[in-house]
Amino acid sequence: MTDWRAVMRDGDDAPMVPERAQEIRRAVIAAAQQPASTAVAWPWSLAVAAVALIVLVGGAGDMARRAALEGDAPAAGLSGERRQVQFATPGGTRIIWELNPEFTLMETLP
């Protein structure tokens, strides 16, 4: 197997024509003067955050509506029923949240 560095060193011994060197130089300078095109990822993050917020607000509204219909607002989300919120991206990534009504922030780990 040949080392790639040896291939690069031994590859082309012919001197470069000055016109070709100038052509390459002009191309590099022109490319360096162009504004860099950067892909902005934050609009996708903002869209995912907005969808998550809409889903959570919609879920809270649904729970409040059900509680109002049942007439027992304090016990609306405490039935022990777990819910899932699922979101799929165009690339195939799936995000699944499991909402646990028995979760409290005051609990400590053993």
Image: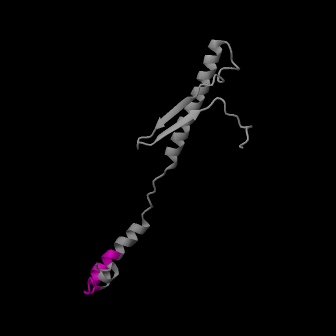
* Nearer to me, 93 or 46: 93
* Nearer to me, 54 or 68: 68
Residue at 53% across / 31% down in the picture? 84
Q: Horizontal and vertical percent for residue 72?
A: 68, 15
Q: Quadrant of the N terminus?
A: bottom left
Q: Horizontal and vertical percent for residue 108?
A: 73, 41
Q: Answer left or right for 92 relative to 85.
A: left
Give the extent of the magenta segment: 10-24
Quadrant of the rendered image containing residue 81: top right
Q: Answer left or right for 54 relative to 29.
A: right
Q: Answer left or right for 2 relative to 54.
A: left
Residue at 70% across / 34% down in the picture? 104
Q: Is residue 21 magenta?
A: yes
Answer above or below: position of 73 versus 13: above
Residue at 29% across / 80% down in the picture? 2
Q: Is residue 98 magenta?
A: no
Q: Horizontal and vertical percent for residue 29?
A: 40, 72
Quadrant of the rendered image containing residue 3: bottom left
* Nearer to me, 23 or 47: 47
Q: Horizontal and vertical percent for residue 26?
A: 35, 73
Q: How many marks?
A: 0
